[in-house]
Amino acid sequence: MGREATTMIRSMTGYGRREASWAGGSVTVEIRAVNHRFCEVVARLPRPLVSLEEEFKRTIQRRCTRGRIDLTVSFTGARDTGKTLSLDRAVAKQYHQLLAVLKRELRLSGTIDLALLAGFREIISISDQPVENQGLQRVVKRLLAGALSDLDAMRRREGAVLARDTRTRVDEIADATRRIREKVPTVVAGHFERMKARIERLVGAGQIDVARLTQELALFADRCDVSEELTRLGSHLEQFSTSLKSEGAVGRTLDFLIQEMGREVNTIGAKANDAEIAALVIHMKGELEKIREQVQNIE
């Protein structure tokens, strides 16, 4: 089978990272992708960006159709990234009034000042509620787009490596298929002649129906013929090679074709009943298993 210089398939593993200055520090966007049967996106975002989680997930899912993708956005040394202070004036006034009453009734000394009131947590509180910051959102979206491009580039490079290795193994299987196809007529004829000779020895000089015997032997030999299995195997190999050149997610298609090829190879091994073909079948099974391992990482 011919080889292509380029490939469109992508691996499911990859990494992308972009960083930019923000608020006296920096903001970093990291994306890690590993194997997964479906597309699962997990986002870890700081408080100011939690409202954008679903939007970020949709952005990633438009670029990645399979794999577990972990998105992490973090700040380093940045200020004003979500925490806000709030003052409850009504509560402060109530504290002041009640303390004044208590001081008067108990005839206490001392002053009711700011230092005293500041000790009550209900008056001044820290809030972690998300804050709308359009500038921050724009920066993170830009970084996300860049990190996704880095991730995609790495997945394509890994895909090219997987495709090259897989094509080599597909060629090995195709070559073994050709060798089996060339040997099949000889194997079938050999089975026919050996069975005929055995039956003739058993019957001896007795009268036999030669036409009927020939028909039965032909049926037996036909059961040893693997031409149909070889034809289907060749078709699967062609589809597999075509899928390796396709754009988009083909991992499931390749996995299905491997199962079908394995089924045909097993049938060939069971029917052929020939030592040389059996050795070729074992070789094909080994190559199919190695291809299966590689396909598990193709998107």
Image (cartoon, rainbow, N blue to C red):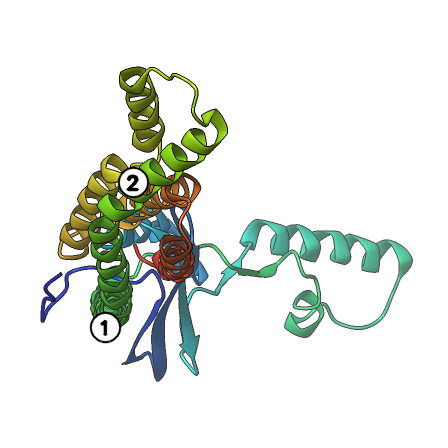
Residue 140 pos. (x, y %): 28, 66
Q: Nearer the viewer, residue 285 or 160?
A: 285
- Residue 291 or 138: which is nearer the viewer? 291
Q: Residue under circle 1? A: 157
Q: State which mark lies toward you, 2 or 1.
A: 2
Q: In the rendered image, which quarter is residue 121 located in?
A: bottom right
Q: Quadrant of the C terminus?
A: bottom left
Q: Is residue 249 visible?
A: no
Report crowding for label 1: few under 14, some 14 to 19, many 20 or more residues within 10 A (C-alpha). some
Q: Is residue 101 left or right of residue 70?
A: right
Q: Secondary structure at mark 2?
A: helix
The quadrant holding residue 204 is top left
Evaluate if marks 2 and 1 touch, with contact meaning CB atoms under 8 Å apart: no
Residue appearing at x 37%, y 33% in the figure: 196
Q: Name which residue type carries label 1.
A: Arg
Please tell me whether residue 206 is drawn above or below residue 162 in the rendered image. Answer: above
Q: Earlier in the sequence, mark 2 or mark 1?
A: 1
Residue 210 lies left or right of residue 239; in this view the side is: right
Q: Position of residue 193 (x, y in %)?
A: 33, 39
**What separation in Å lies between label 2 and label 1 (alpha carbons)?**
46 Å
For the residue marked with disc 2, what is the amino acid?
Val
Residue 39 position (above or below residue 199) = below
Image quadrant where one finds the N terminus: bottom left
Measured from the top left, where is residue 276 in percent x and y? 37, 58
Residue that badge 2 annotates: 188
Left or right of 119: which side holds 54?
Answer: left
| Residue at figure coordinates x 17%, y 46% from the top left | 239
